[in-house]
Image: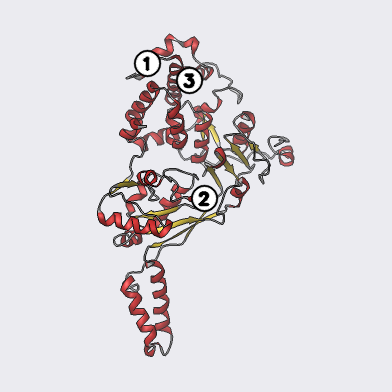
Amino acid sequence: MHRLIQRGLMFGNLVEVSSPALVERYNRALKHLTGKTTSLTDFHIDISGYSPEIGDELDDHLYLNHGGCNRQFILLTTEQKTAPLLNVQFSTSRDILKSFITRNEPQLFALTARDAVAGELVNSVYSVADPVRLFDIRKIRVEADTTTGTVQNAEKLGRMVDRFKQEEDAWFDDVLIADMISVAKETGDVTRNPVRLEQMEFAQANFWTAHFGGLYIFKEVDHPAVIAMSGKQGLEDLPIKYVFDPTDRNRIAKFFDYDKLVEPIVKARGIDAAAILRQKMDFIVVDAAQDAGVDLTGATRRDIRALARAHADDLPEEFHALRALVNWAEDDGPWPRITSDHPAYFYTLRAADTPDAALVNMLLAELAPKDVRQLFICHKEAFYRAYRTWSDTKRSYVADFLTREYQVDKAGARAALFGHDAPMQEPPPPPRDDLIARVGPWGAVRR
């Protein structure tokens, strides 16, 4: 993984912690949350305050996420909002942390000037040892304060100030006045500089979790389902009718269709569909070249396409199907019929413009894993797992490609691949199928 680290493709954009003051604040927060401290004087942290170096030191990379359930966090600076989230257990966690920091940035900037802010993403579930418990997670609440309780004390002082103003004899209450002075020494003047963090709750509707081999849970769609990437074994008691795994390609395709979660790349607005498909073809060639033992060191796009021409008959079905689709898009060739049984099917799709687009693209990345660019952008945990299994020559090519083609303009690449133009008008709702309403879109599915 050193190649990825050196190029900023792994552990990139972490926040360095090296000043004695920040290290001391971090240790105070770490002790407050976990009872542990670090002896390191220089380390890096992600958006949640997790440090891979400290994880190595403690031999516990879930030291801020015990059981992978209620993630704790340590904020030393608001600059953490741009950092990645490592060791992701739930797909919603980074967005929640980023929203919390952004919405409370002025307050957090003031608080972190003197102390660390420690907190937790709290839900009603404290253990997910049983997959059924995942369905009890409805909302995530953010709780946070400094290690000295500045926010709590400010609220306490605010209540005392209100009481002082409202009670008729408060001017003569020496105990109240003494308490106010004592707390104000810690919080400052809360009447002029309020110290409040917005109480924030986030719905946990549709999400991915790393637990149980990776589950995509779609609860808030017309036809709810779970896609279990490691198989359905042990998931028989889930409180949801449909549970699919990657072998259920037809049913997953119908799930996408009935819930309007995907669109064909060639019919998407505002993108260069042919260019995207050609790049996917290149990645398929790279994968085939790895299997054939071809050295890809320093290979350019021209080299890859020369390989494709020289070994066209040996390339997998995915390549030929995408080539036919490009031929249709660019040269008015015949429309290729690519059904959900075809190994190229999920390579031809991208997420539709819905609130769950990022989650759907994440799932598509796992269903079409040879597209290493989408895998890296949409599902880094799966990318790193796959990277460990590749030959050194494929690792070198992929690292070079991502550095050259993605790192230089991340926002532009994401917009080109996954952006959506505003539609001209809302399409009419499709007619309701009574049979679907009665038995569901996939028919009777046994667990």
Residue 139 in sight in this render: yes
Res 149 quadrant in image: bottom left
Along the polypeptide, which appears first: circle 2 or circle 1?
2
Separation of disc 2 and disc 3 at Cα? Answer: 44 Å
Which label was assigned to residue 295? Answer: 1
Which quadrant would the C terminus be assigned to in this image?
top right
Q: Earlier in the sequence, mark 2 or mark 3?
A: 2
Q: Is residue 132 above or below residue 345?
A: below
Q: How is the image coloured?
A: secondary structure
> Mark 3 highlights which residue?
326
Look at mark 2 in the image and give the residue it sits on.
Answer: 69
Question: Can residue 271 be seen by looking at this rendering?
Answer: no
Q: Residue furthest left?
A: 19
Disc 2 crowd, CA 10 A, few/some/many (<14, 14-19, 20+): many
Residue 343, how many percent across, how many down? 56, 23
Residue at the location (48% across, 20% down)? Answer: 326
Kind of residue at badge 2: Cys
Quarter in which the N terminus is drawn = top left
